[in-house]
Image (cartoon, rainbow, N blue to C red):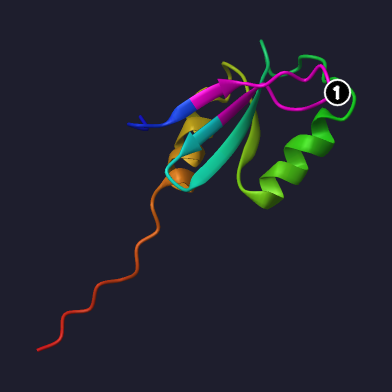
Amino acid sequence: MFPGCMVMKLDSGYVQGIPDLLVLHEDKWATLECKKYKGAKKQPNQEYYVGRMDEMSFSRFICPENKEEVLHELQKALRPWRATCISWC
């Protein structure tokens, strides 16, 4: 889905609530907090960090029930920005 991207498992041992995965793609990044199912328990501070990182770039809770939607949103967020090309005659 994202050729050349790097996906790293984050260690939340130092800061409780940091999302599970960091996705690096070109000059953009995203984080994902993985849950086994939609209603799974959230650890303290997870809502805060997912929300804060979403304000900075892109961050979501992802689970089997919303996987396709989140991956579609992630694909749009990591898409390279390109200026509109205008043809001059």
Q: Which residue is at a point 78% across and 36% down the rendered structure image? A: 49
Q: In screen coordinates, is 18 left or right of 75?
A: right
The foreground one among 68 and 58 is 58
Q: Please state the extent of the stretch shown in magenta in the rendering.
A: 7-22
Q: Per the image, is 18 magenta?
A: yes
Residue 78 locus on image (x, y percent): 46, 44
Q: In which quarter of the image is the N terminus?
A: top left
Residue 12 locus on image (x, y percent): 77, 20
Q: Which residue is at a point 50% across and 35% down the rendered structure image? A: 24
Residue at the far left in the pictured view: 89
Question: Mainly helix, strand or loop, the magenta region?
Answer: loop
Residue at the far front in the pictured view: 14
Q: Is residue 68 above or below residue 36?
A: below
- Residue under label 1, please give it: 16
The foreground one among 37 and 50 is 50
Label 1 secondary element: loop
The foreground one among 70 and 65 is 70
Q: Which residue is at a point 15% across and 86% down the rendered structure image? A: 88
Q: In screen coordinates, is 81 left or right of 65?
A: left
Which quadrant would residue 30 be assigned to in this image? top right
Q: In which quarter of the image is the C terminus?
A: bottom left
Q: In screen coordinates, is 28 left or right of 85?
A: right
